[in-house]
Amino acid sequence: MHELSLARSLIEQILALAAEHRARRVNRVVVTLGPFSGVVRDSFEFGFNILKQEQEPVREAVLELETPDPEYVCRDCDKVAVIPFPRQSERLELARCGLAAKKCPWCGSNRLSPRGGTELILNQLEME
Amino acid sequence: MCDTCGCQLHEHHHHDTKVVEVNRSLLEANQKQAESNRHHIEHMGAVAINLISSPGSGKTTLLERTIDELKASCSIGVIEGDIETERDADRIRAKGVPAVQLTTGGACHLDAPMVHGGLHVLEHFAKGRPLDLIFIENVGNLVCPATFDLGEHRRVVLLSTPEGSDKPAKYPATFKSADLMLITKVDLLPHFDFSVEEAAGQARALKPELEIITLSATTGDGFAGWLAYLRGLLAQRTAHEH
């Protein structure tokens, strides 16, 4: 639910940068959402697309979201594993097969700790 | 460097469009305000604690007993965050301690600008009396508050025994961001299927250095450890000042 306030601060940041660069329009916005940032991609996108309509310079802006795959450290074998989040459709299938729980691909432990991935970054703006 | 024309500018400028590399956090504004809050609090001579938990895990009850135990030896102020009502601030004021109620009107978390406003009102309520310890009781929610630094010195997450011992694994961002986990309502352990060992194990899998204290604000069981933690913070603060 805090996605809306984050989308609002993103738009404020973009408007300030557009003014600073004397741009009339912002065409493209590239943002990185870390896998453990606590931000739901769809809600964030939804919030941004609603809020941008209130501001002329960003009304047409396209939001590109980069979402790096999540990394974990195994607390049992200390190895690092990259385990992508399953897609919504796959989640149900995994649940049906009893495979919903994440396991370390090296030793099979379920004691996995998220590593990094909390970043929320405005990377790039394309303006004119 | 720009690939098209080889110029050294960071900004490209072809066909009237330009691409600017920004590389700044979306939380930048909140982060700046949080740093300023921390300076403000230190300037007041105080230490601030951000309390995070799900609704009903005992944050306000914890504060009531903490105030009873520490009121004689240190001066406390409280900022309460809720979606609606002054109920929590009223409970704290009944203990004779200044309390500010921030009602978010729907927002699921406190942010640094809200707390900034709260600090000024708290100073007004304290009527010039210096504060040693400021508690910021966040909106009851184990998800959203984790993202927002408020300018606190320590983040404390509460997990009450009726909630179940699997919460650290289910809400990793919040437990990983905490400095201390309090397992509350341990007087109810005989009535619930809660394993302190499991909860601690899950939390430490996320963050091995996490401190953990188990207590009951009703019976006072384990409360000495929490008070010692707070006294330790106050002592550190005094050490910094000199």
Image (cartoon, helix red, strand yellow):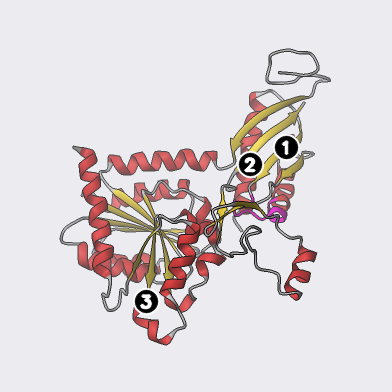
**Residue positioned most to the right:** B15
Residue B128, x across and y down, in percent? 22, 47
Q: Which residues are magenta?
A: A35-44
Residue designated by label 1: A29
**On-image quarter of the C terminus of chain B:** top left
Kindly report the distance in space between the C-alpha atoms of the residues bearing marks 2 and 1. Answer: 10 Å
Residue B127, x across and y down, in percent? 23, 50
| Vertical arrangement, residue B103 with respect to residue B124, above or below | below
Q: Amino acid at mark 2?
A: Leu
Element carrying mark 2? helix
Main SS of residues in magenta: loop
| Label 2: few (<14), some (14–19) or many (≥20) C-alpha neighbours in 10 Å | many
Residue designated by label 3: B185
Q: Amino acid at mark 3?
A: Lys
Residue B78, x across and y down, in percent? 33, 58
Q: Amino acid at mark 1?
A: Val
Kindly report the distance in space between the C-alpha atoms of the residues bearing marks 2 and 3. Answer: 40 Å
Residue designated by label 2: A10
Evaluate whether residue B231 shows in this view: yes
